[in-house]
Amino acid sequence: MTDFSRTKSLFHLPEGMVYLDGNSLGPLPIAAEKHLLNTLRNEWGELLIKGWNEAGWMNKPNQLGDRLAKMLGAPPSSIMLGDTLSIKVYQALAAALDLAGERKIILSDTGNFPTDLYMAQGLIRSLDRDLELVLKQPEEIGDSLDETIGVLMLTQIDYRTGRMHDMAALTAKAQALGIITVWDLAHSAGAVPIDLRAANADFAAGCTYKYLNSGPGGPAFIYVAPKHQQNLKPVLAGWHGHEAPFAFDLDYRAGPAIERMRIGTPPILQISVLESALDVWDGVDMEDVRQKSIELSQLFIELIEQQCPQFTLASPRDAAMRGSQVSFQFAEGYAVMQAIIERGVIGDYRAPDIMRFGFTPLYLDEDDIRKGVAIIADVVNSGLWKRDKYRAKKAVT
Amino acid sequence: MTDFSRTKSLFHLPEGMVYLDGNSLGPLPIAAEKHLLNTLRNEWGELLIKGWNEAGWMNKPNQLGDRLAKMLGAPPSSIMLGDTLSIKVYQALAAALDLAGERKIILSDTGNFPTDLYMAQGLIRSLDRDLELVLKQPEEIGDSLDETIGVLMLTQIDYRTGRMHDMAALTAKAQALGIITVWDLAHSAGAVPIDLRAANADFAAGCTYKYLNSGPGGPAFIYVAPKHQQNLKPVLAGWHGHEAPFAFDLDYRAGPAIERMRIGTPPILQISVLESALDVWDGVDMEDVRQKSIELSQLFIELIEQQCPQFTLASPRDAAMRGSQVSFQFAEGYAVMQAIIERGVIGDYRAPDIMRFGFTPLYLDEDDIRKGVAIIADVVNSGLWKRDKYRAKKAVT
């Protein structure tokens, strides 16, 4: 049984804040500071260039990839760390299109995170060979699969509503029709149990700064099913993915297996923090996380619906259909979100009218939920959110 | 007049080490630790998601881009920070190919850093429209320009020899023939005076962890000449480059000007260190840096040629033709480099037989050069390097 009071003690959580936004950016793992200072002082500071060998920097992207692989039900040497999610989605999609042969359609849904769609649009434009990105509503995807489709590219858990696709079922259906699958796990990794091997996914990508708590701009990752690795010709063919980066050949030769998904020099300081963030997961059972996430989410829905009847649940009511976030719709959601943030309850807002709240059992408990709902209800029912200052828009991530 | 004893005092330099590898990875700026801890504790730790607005994280990539622009003779809003050099070269090359129209040839040289060539090869393969990467020797480039060439892609300063292309002259000649130019400034930024405006470069990219001292895996940058910015359709069309990232539109619309060169979420911790690293440059005159770099390099060449006649100078003898590094060839250069590194003189090795030494006036003085040469000469002339342990190969960056 996972000891969540222990995991909670491993994070720095600001005094008086109820943080329901770990689905956007996780909090600071306390051990990260010491570990990062060691990387800074004793590795970079003392070893300088020798750090690449002596501090093992060169191997961090695949070592941490292997740690993520264990968490995500993937075999060793199938996940590589690096870059941003946008870049990793691009790598995966480009490789998937190579495998899709003559088929021209990339199918996705309107709940995919926009950067995935944008990266697809940029790739399609540059390739200039009649490819087409077709978007359906999330619930229409299953019935939209047919043999004209080359690639199915989806974010498993909808960033707006938390609605969760059945990755295994859709992958099986897609593959039976000869469709290659690309799964974005941005809102899945660390949020719900994932078994990439059982789901038989072809490609996946994800980020580490949400439920995995690696800090702002922490590196992303890519998964390539072993059966696809050796035939994959990287479109972003950087020197770190070369078979022999330090031979300085003039011609690219792809490195073995997942190594070819490396591109440039990895961000060692961000990676150092990710290491501490992953340490928190040692001894954590993902099934326990899921169970507690559902309890916290259900409690939140119940209390909000009792106390803020103005809000409409935007997430699936069935917990099995949801990731680890809950969204409510409210026409003035932006202003409400600003007002509750000022009172110390941190969620976030997604246009046009969605208020999102993330549930992260590693550092949230029932008391936090009750405290958070009390403040939200007070803000809503007192009309505090109607003040002009809360309505003036600014960028929110 | 730049006070180099002051700048030297701003770096952590390991006791007893003579660091001649700032062309690979610069040393730790002392102020970086405090600044990074502030980012970690007070920004990420206390503000969490609010850091994107309240700590100004969203604007760091363009703000620091503008600081770099000042150093590189570029106008405001023409440089964007982010990703790795490989990715930034890819963005620049893809955009340059769009401008090159029907021309099929990308011209580069054998002294270009391999990742630039690899990224071009990956892009050419994916575009599948008869594009060709043609490589010449560095000194043949000027005479190889003609109207069949679409893009001239060069690293200004050769990573092996330090040989420097005349960026302004080659750009002018190329542009007169309708060729678009892409300059890699990896070994130029912070090493030699750069005036992107005067050189009239179309595109440039560079990295910050060499002469700019931002730490292992620090972010790269891209320059796009203002005249090209508005027409540029990004191939890596990430959400941070969208006109309105937080509108979450389903369609990509490129952001204004250089903003469209953003891709995904920027690495805030690495950026924090870069900020401290750039602070060191305040009050530094790049002409003074160049002058002192030449003095140190000349002294090094003189002393090495006196004391190690076995070595052959691989760099141009004329300082005006050289960047801020000096390379010597020696058949057993690998073993020599391992042996001198063990004695505390850090340079690096590039296959097949090149020993590279970087000259970085911000933290190196004449004493360092004399100390370093004494150790190199001792290792070479005593035959210490012939021990088996120095000949056993391992990866070196």
Image (cartoon, coloured by chain):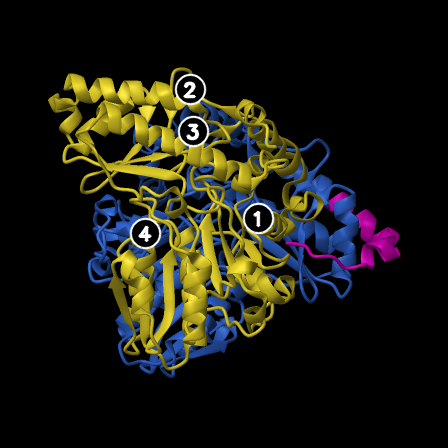
Chain colours: A blue, B yellow
List the residue tagged with mark 3.
A44
Query: In the rendering, at what x and y percent does residue A301 appear?
Result: 65, 53
| Marks 4 and 1 in Cβ contact (< 8 Å) | no
Query: Considering only vertical position in the picture, is B178 above or below B325?
Result: below
> Callout 1: 10 Å neighbours few (<14), some, many (20+)?
many
Give the alpha-carbon distance from disc 4 to disc 1, as whole Å: 22 Å
Residue underneath mark 2: B367
Residue A159 in view here = no
Report the chain holding disc 4: B
Q: Position of residue A198 (x, y in %)?
A: 30, 55
- Upstream in sequence: badge 2 or badge 1: 1
Q: Quadrant of the N terminus of chain B?
A: top right
The amino acid beneath tag 3 is: Trp
In screen coordinates, is B5 left or right of B104? right
The Cα atoms of the two marked residues, 3 and 4, are separated by 24 Å
Q: Amino acid at mark 2?
A: Asp
Residue at which label 1 appears: B68
Q: Amino acid at mark 1?
A: Leu
Q: What is the secondary structure assignment of the residue under circle 2?
A: helix
In front: B168, or A36? B168
SS for tag 3? helix
**In contact (CB < 8 Å): disc 2 and disc 3:** no
Task: Using residue B261 as the reference point, say whether residue A302 is left or right of it.
Answer: right
Chain of the residue where label 1 is placed in the rendered structure: B
In magenta, the rendered stretch is A373-397
Element assignment for label 4: loop
| Residue type at numbered disc 4 | Phe
Q: Chain of mark 3?
A: A
Please give the name of the residue rendered at 44% of the width and 58% of the height, measured from the top-left corner.
Answer: B167
